[in-house]
Image (cartoon, rainbow, N blue to C red):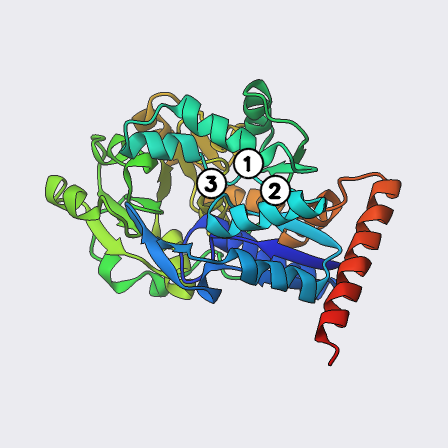
């Protein structure tokens, strides 16, 4: 298929959404699909308030229209609710083109954590944005059930995968130099250092050994000042990031707002067991896995996870492949029955003919 993907989350941003989209696109292309990505780096942008690394595309609507016409997609997926996503959604509705969306982040909770905006307002916006789509792809069953109760329709599963070649167990020689002399056990968290990640629930725990935070974000400076005994390693990438995962004795995931938690699988793939609260994401991955512990008492979960065999964590992570994830994504791209798809192709051909006529001398 010719797949058009519109997203406000894209490189050089570093987060689970970008990693998921980038790997899914690579797998789609390996499967023979043609993928056109519309992302903020292709437009003039400004930084979003409180999220400076996330860019808001300016005056993108007309350019995105032309990209639609030039590419003539057979399937359209809108991954995010920012400027690019809003423009693509508007085009699809105006031209009556079927499209799918995916629900990656708890946008209402993130906004409410920073501004005096009730989560009900955020969810009203999210329903407005997503419900016209043919399918809303969600990562876990627990989150699907939650969104269904909040009035979302056409919800379909789209799980995640993990790169088990990059994220793998490492030898003692591969432990990052800065971590080699830290007292064991090492309790690690990787992700955006921001209020919605609930990091203080982890940093305030009475645990033996050392706590390590990998990542950057608006709360880093304040947390470094408040918790001087914690080692903040900053943002890490590629092999360096994978080595930090593997160096941990336990990966601690205190977030209550993530919809999946890709870092959970990345930690398990390196052999590091996971301790987490029983929130959506962790409760879909951890119970019964033999690779981690969920508990309302996060300290108890950490100490129990320390007893887990690292080999069992690795074996569990190997069940999650990016190819299976991508096949599920592609299946979800066909939301309409055959007669509707036929009308879709006819509209696209008509748009193509109009475009060619305007180009004639």
Name the residue that disc number 1 marks.
Answer: 129
Instruction: Please give the name of the residue rendered at 41% of the width and 62% of the height, measured from the top-left corner.
Output: 12
Q: Are marks 1 and 3 in contact (CB under 8 Å)?
A: no
Q: Secondary structure at mark 2?
A: strand
Name the residue that disc number 2 marks.
Answer: 101
How packed is label 2: few (under 14 Cα within 10 Å), some, or many (20 or more)?
Answer: many
Instruction: Please give the name of the residue rendered at 77% of the width and 56% of the height, measured from the top-left corner.
Output: 348
Which of the two residues, 323 or 187, is positioned nearer the viewer here?
A: 323
Closer to the chain start, of discs 1 and 2, is 2
Spatial separation of the CA atoms under disc 1 and disc 2 = 9 Å
Spatial separation of the CA atoms under disc 2 and disc 3 = 19 Å
The x, y position of residue 87, in whole percent, is 54, 50
Q: Secondary structure at mark 1?
A: helix
Residue 261 - label = 3
Spatial separation of the CA atoms under disc 1 and disc 3 = 23 Å
Q: Do we see residue 24 in this rendering? A: no
The x, y position of residue 20, in whole percent, is 54, 52
* Between marks 1 and 3 in the image, the one whose residue lies nearer the viewer: 1
Quadrant position of residue 137: top right
Left or right of 128? Residue 82 is left
Which of the two residues, 9 or 171, is positioned nearer the viewer here?
A: 9
Left or right of 242? Residue 196 is left
Q: Are marks 1 and 2 in contact (CB under 8 Å)?
A: yes
Instruction: Please give the name of the residue rendered at 39% of the width and 24% of the height, measured from the top-left corner.
Output: 119
**Which residue is most to the front?**
361
Instruction: Please give the name of the residue rendered at 22% of the width and 42% of the height, measured from the top-left corner.
Output: 209
* Between marks 1 and 2 in the image, the one whose residue lies nearer the viewer: 1
How packed is label 3: few (under 14 Cα within 10 Å), some, or many (20 or more)?
Answer: many
């Amino acid at each position: 298929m010719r797949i058009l993907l519109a997203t406000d989350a894209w490189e050089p941003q570093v987060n689970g959404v970008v990693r998921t989209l980038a790997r899914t696109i690579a797998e789609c292309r390996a499967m023979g699909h043609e993928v056109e990505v519309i992302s903020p780096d292709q437009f003039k942008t400004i930084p979003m308030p409180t999220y400076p690394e996330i860019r808001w595309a300016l005056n993108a609507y007309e350019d995105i229209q032309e990209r639609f016409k030039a590419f003539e997609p057979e399937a359209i997926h809108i991954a995010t609710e920012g400027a690019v996503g809003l423009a693509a959604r508007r085009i699809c509705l105006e031209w009556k083109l079927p499209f799918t969306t995916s629900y990656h982040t708890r946008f209402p909770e993130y906004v409410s954590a920073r501004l005096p905006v009730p989560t009900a307002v955020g969810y009203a916006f999210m329903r407005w944005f997503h419900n016209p789509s043919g399918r809303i792809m969600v990562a876990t069953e627990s989150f699907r059930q939650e969104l269904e109760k909040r009035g979302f329709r056409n919800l379909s599963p789209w799980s995640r995968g993990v790169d088990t070649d990059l994220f793998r167990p490492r030898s003692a020689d591969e432990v990052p130099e800065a971590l080699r002399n830290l007292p064991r056990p090492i309790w690690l968290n990787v992700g955006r250092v921001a209020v919605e990640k609930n990091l203080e629930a982890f940093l305030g725990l009475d645990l033996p050994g050392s706590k390590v935070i990998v990542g950057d974000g608006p709360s880093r400076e304040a947390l470094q000042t408040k918790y001087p005994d914690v080692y903040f390693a900053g943002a890490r990438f590629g092999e360096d990031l994978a080595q930090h995962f593997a160096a941990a004795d336990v990966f601690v995931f205190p977030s209550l707002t993530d919809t999946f938690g890709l870092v959970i699988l990345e930690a398990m793939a390196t052999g590091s067991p996971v301790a987490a609260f029983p929130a959506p994401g962790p409760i879909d991955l951890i119970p019964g896995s033999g690779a981690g512990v969920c508990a309302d008492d996060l300290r108890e979960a950490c100490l129990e996870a320390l007893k887990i065999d690292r080999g069992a964590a690795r074996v569990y992570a190997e069940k999650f492949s990016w190819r299976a994830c991508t096949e599920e994504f592609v299946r979800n791209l066909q939301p309409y029955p055959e007669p509707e798809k036929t009308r879709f192709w006819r509209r696209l051909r008509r748009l193509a003919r109009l475009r060619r006529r305007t180009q004639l001398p």
